[in-house]
Image: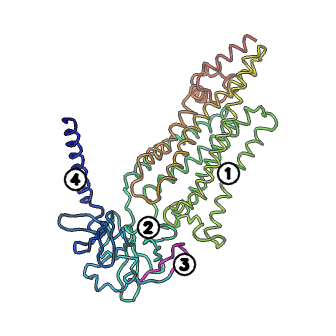
């Protein structure tokens, strides 16, 4: 009997808690006061719905605000904000025309939004953290869902508003342009400018040391040069030194596109070169001719892409929506996902995928070479030295690709999941951008800050001649060794043989 009483008390408490929860849930503010109407005097039906002025609200579309019952009209109809309507009443607002498309988004007709029951006019501008930009009437294309279609860029009803009828009889929309903070731009510019001296130093060191000017060294010089110019132009663009849509801005945009794409193609050349070298195909062509082929590819392909951009921007060959529109919205490509994918991220994806293939095959070949070397006793010192050199160079290039390729790959992913023109991208985007900004420092420490280059510099400027002369033989037959002990081990092997 006692257990039954306790069970009933628990059931009663549970029912009371459930009722309180339901009451509390009904008091939750489902929408803002701006997007709601007073439906206190509406008719409440037995099923919980409320009907007011021909509009029916379900229980999930209204809430209780004290003694006032408010219906979320924007959950029932398509809301349209009206700017500069402080002195206009709803009765006086009888005309508000716009081009409204059908459900397919293609066919549009001029419709009076004030007289159409599908739409509800809010005589107040939505909240805007930036500034309002007024468009011409021809750009007004409202979708059947109440969104503004601006050159295939969709803005929902909280991002734009319609202006009342002007004296000349036109109706104009205005959309909220988010005002981005200058701090991230300043940080990016600072990061680019920090990396720039390290890139220049890397280029200068390889330019003054003939021992480093083989195919791999010259490819690195071209890669560093294109990346340095890109970083300089990116820094200038971040600190807004150009006027909007000026000739200098457009020229910088086209130059930046060429140098940035050239840096990716030269990184692809470096990946292919180590793949080609480890594959045992050296000696089939001269070093000079091979570098000529590399140059034609790594400079020619970006030049063709740049020429296509110029052709599309200044002719009517393709639709306006598919053009790169370089320099229209900033000193680079148009900030639209389709445009950036076609002209920037698609080539990046192809080149990065090719680099991954080259490094995967090279790693497999090196692994097989190690297995063969372990099983073979009569391995000559020359072959061992060459294989050791290939492993070292592969390790350096792999770290370079991991630093550049992986960060750009993650940036592609972040570009896919984020909308353009957002005022505050997530912190992951900032982190990836900072990693790319500081790439010049990492490149310098990978290819310059090692014992071999230090000794070559000392030899070049008359210091440490004895050290350089002792190690000259092994240094001239190896590329980008990270540790001088490897080279000395090779000398010992030569002496034994």
* Protein image colouring: rainbow
Mark closest to the chain's N terminus, 2 or 4: 4
State yes or no: discs 1 and 4 in contact (Cβ < 8 Å): no
Q: Quadrant of the N terminus?
A: top left
Q: Quadrant of the C terminus?
A: top right
Q: Which mark is residue 155?
A: 2
Q: Which residue is mark 1?
A: 299
Identify which residue is drawn at 60% across, 32% down. 396
Per the model, the C-alpha gap separating discs 1 and 4 is 72 Å
- Local packing at callout 1 (Cα closer than 10 Å; few below 14, some 14-19, many 20+) is some
Numbered range of the magenta stretch: 96-108
Answer with left or right where residue 419 lies relative to residue 280: left
Q: Is residue 480 above or below residue 147?
A: above
State yes or no: discs 1 and 2 in contact (Cβ < 8 Å): no
Identify which residue is drawn at 31% across, 68% down. 49
Mark closest to the chain's N terminus, 2 or 3: 3
Q: Which mark is residue 20?
A: 4
Answer with left or right where residue 9 lies relative to residue 153: left
State yes or no: discs 1 and 3 in contact (Cβ < 8 Å): no
Q: Position of residue 378 (x, y in %)?
A: 79, 14
Per the model, the C-alpha gap separating discs 1 and 2 is 40 Å
Q: Position of residue 330 (x, y in %)?
A: 49, 62
Q: Which residue is mark 3?
A: 107
Q: Position of residue 136 (x, y in %)?
A: 44, 79
The verdict on residue 98 being magenta is: yes
Q: Secondary structure at mark 2?
A: strand
State yes or no: discs 2 and 4 in contact (Cβ < 8 Å): no
């Amino acid at each position: 009997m006692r257990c039954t009483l306790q069970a009933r008390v628990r059931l009663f408490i549970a029912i009371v808690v459930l009722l309180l929860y339901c009451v509390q849930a009904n008091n939750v503010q489902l929408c803002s006061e701006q997007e709601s109407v007073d439906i206190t005097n509406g008719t409440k039906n037995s099923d919980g719905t409320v009907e007011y002025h021909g509009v029916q609200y379900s229980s999930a579309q209204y809430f209780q605000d004290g003694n006032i019952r408010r219906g979320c009209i924007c959950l029932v109809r398509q809301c349209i904000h009206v700017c500069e309507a402080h002195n206009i009443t709803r009765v006086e607002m009888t005309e508000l025309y716009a081009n409204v498309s059908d459900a397919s988004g293609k066919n549009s007709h001029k419709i009076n939004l004030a007289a159409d029951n599908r739409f509800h006019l809010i005589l107040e501008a939505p909240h805007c953290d930036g500034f309002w930009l007024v468009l011409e009437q021809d750009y007004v294309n409202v979708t059947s869902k109440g969104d503004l279609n601006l050159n295939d860029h969709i803005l929902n009803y909280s991002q734009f508003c319609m202006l009342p009828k002007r004296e000349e009889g036109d109706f104009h929309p205005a959309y909220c342009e988010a005002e981005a903070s200058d701090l991230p731009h300043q940080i990016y510019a600072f990061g680019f400018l920090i990396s720039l001296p390290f890139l220049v130093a890397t280029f200068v060191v390889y330019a003054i040391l003939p021992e480093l000017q083989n195919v791999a060294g010259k490819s690195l010089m071209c890669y560093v040069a294109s990346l340095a110019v890109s970083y300089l132009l990116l820094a200038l663009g971040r600190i807004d030194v150009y006027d909007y849509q000026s000739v200098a801005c457009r020229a910088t945009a086209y130059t930046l596109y060429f140098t940035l794409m050239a840096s990716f193609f030269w990184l692809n050349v470096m990946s292919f070169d180590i793949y080609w070298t480890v594959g045992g195909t050296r000696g089939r062509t001269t070093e000079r001719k091979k570098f000529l082929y590399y140059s034609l590819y790594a400079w020619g392909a970006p030049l063709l892409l740049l020429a296509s951009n110029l052709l599309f921007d200044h002719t009517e060959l393709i639709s306006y929506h598919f053009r790169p529109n370089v320099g229209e919205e900033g000193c680079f490509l148009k900030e639209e996902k389709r445009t950036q994918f076609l002209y920037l991220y698609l080539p990046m994806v192809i080149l990065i995928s090719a680099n991954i293939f080259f490094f995967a095959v090279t790693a497999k070949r090196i692994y097989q070479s190690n297995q063969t070397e372990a099983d073979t006793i009569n391995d000559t010192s020359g072959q061992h030295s060459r294989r050791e050199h290939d492993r070292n160079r592969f390790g350096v290039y792999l770290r370079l690709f991991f630093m550049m390729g992986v960060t750009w790959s993650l940036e592609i992913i972040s570009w896919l999941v984020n909308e353009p023109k957002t005022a505050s991208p997530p912190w992951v985007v900032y982190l990836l951008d900072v990693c790319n900004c500081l790439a010049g420092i990492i490149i310098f420490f990978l290819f310059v800050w090692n014992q071999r280059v230090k000794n070559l510099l000392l030899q070049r400027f008359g210091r440490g001649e004895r050290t350089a002369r002792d190690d000259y033989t092994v240094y001239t037959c190896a590329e980008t060794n990270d540790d001088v002990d490897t080279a000395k081990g090779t000398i010992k092997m030569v002496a034994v043989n």
